[in-house]
Image (cartoon, grey):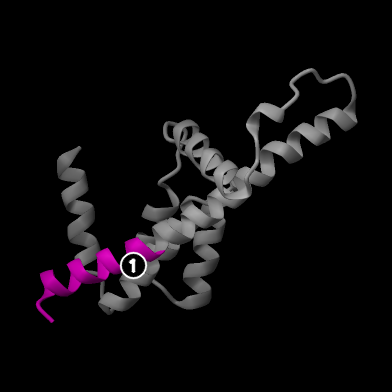
Amino acid sequence: MRKRLVDALKYIVHIDASANRIALSSGLGMVIGFSPYLGFHTLLATIVSVGLRLPIYPLMIGAYITNPFTIPPIYAFLYKVGVILTDSNKKDLNWNIHSFSELITLAKNILWPLFVGCHVFGLVAGVVTYFVVKYLLIKYRGY
């Protein structure tokens, strides 16, 4: 496991692109990885990579921060962030569903805080990742 991580980091360091472009790719990958669009992360990362001509490897690493093992804790955390940011009260969730309209209301009460939490935290994680990766690449590469 450690060897695979070291190999991945070595690969990123030696990508033929500027530190700025690799860092941008990494940061956008994190934004995509924390987005609520499950099932579309690979597609989004590919579109961003091709559209902005960024290296795809750092984008995919960020996009795959959410995987079947990490989805439950990450999205639970992001939902809580969204509840705080939207001032939602999760105690208002009514789990006694007797009609389709009650199901839609429950979905809205869950999805809006999740949507907000995912995007806000994703942007913060993306910006932090950008600066950390850029700093490390500049320090490692010596320029």
Quarter holding residue 14: bottom left
For image coordinates 55% across by 55% down, the residue present is: 119
Q: Residue at x 12, y 74 (%)?
A: 141
Examine the rendered structure and indicate whether residue 55 appears above or below residue 108. below
Give the residue displayed 21% in from the left and 47% down from the top.
Answer: 5
Asked if residue 134 lies in the magenta stretch, the reply is yes
* Residue 27 picture location, percent across and down: 39, 64
Q: Is residue 89 left or right of residue 29?
A: right
* Relative side of 5 to 121, left or right: left
Residue 102 coordinates in the image, percent (x, y):
85, 29
Horizontal placement of 51 versus 126: left or right? right
Quadrant for the C terminus in the image:
bottom left
Q: Which residue is mark 1?
A: 130
Query: How many numbered discs, if any?
Result: 1
Above or below, comparing residue 31 to residue 17 in the picture? above
In the image, what residue type sits under mark 1?
Answer: Tyr
Secondary element at image label 1: helix
Classified by dominant secondary structure, the portion drawn in magenta counts as: helix
The quarter of the rendered structure image containing the N terminus is top left
Residue 69: quadrant of the picture: top left
- Left or right for 12, reference 140: right
| Identity of the residue drawn at 49% across and 50% down | 34
Label 1 crowding class (10 Å Cα cut-off): few <14, some 14-19, many 20+? many
Query: Residue 135 location in percent, x, y?
Result: 21, 70
Q: What is the magenta range?
A: 127-143
Residue 29 is one of the magenta-drawn residues: no
> Percent position (x, y) of residue 122?
48, 55
Which residue is more in the foreground, 125 or 10? 125
